[in-house]
Amino acid sequence: MENTIASRIERYRVDRKLTQQELADKSGISKGGFLKMLKNNKFPSDVLEAIAKALEVSIINLVADIDVNKETLKKLSRDLDELSTQL
């Protein structure tokens, strides 16, 4: 499977058991517009933010192939704190 923004959006959509229409509605865009963006893998930043919010993920999860959640961020913060004390 491709590793694109569109493919990640689709993966999160399917994981959350949303139809394309439901995700488009929750994101405030038309289904036709949504499908066109998926096909072209081009998303305006405001639409990408709306999609991320509708999917309940960080926008980083959509633009990069990493899973960023609260626990990951807390761990990174602790690691940075630890490193800063070692400097």
Image: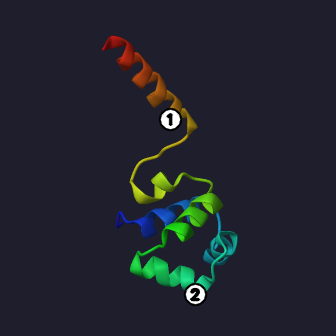
Circle 1: residue type: Leu
Between disc 2 and disc 1, the foreground one is 1
Asked which secondary structure carries label 1, the reply is: helix
Give the farthest residue toward the top: 86
Neighbour class for label 1 at 10 Å: few (<14), some, many (≥20)? few
**Mark 2 vs 1, N-terminal side:** 2
Find residue 32 and name its label: 2
x and y, in percent, of residue 40 in the image: 40, 81
Nearer to us in this view, 15 or 52: 52
> Can residue 31 be seen?
yes
Residue at 52% x, 30% y is: 74
Residue at 69% x, 69% y is: 26
Give the farthest residue toward the bottom: 32
Residue contact at pointers 2 and 1, CB within 8 angstroms: no
Is 31 located above or below residue 71 in the figure? below
x and y, in percent, of residue 29 in the image: 63, 78
Q: Is residue 53 left or right of residue 69?
A: right
Write down the residue under mark 1.
73
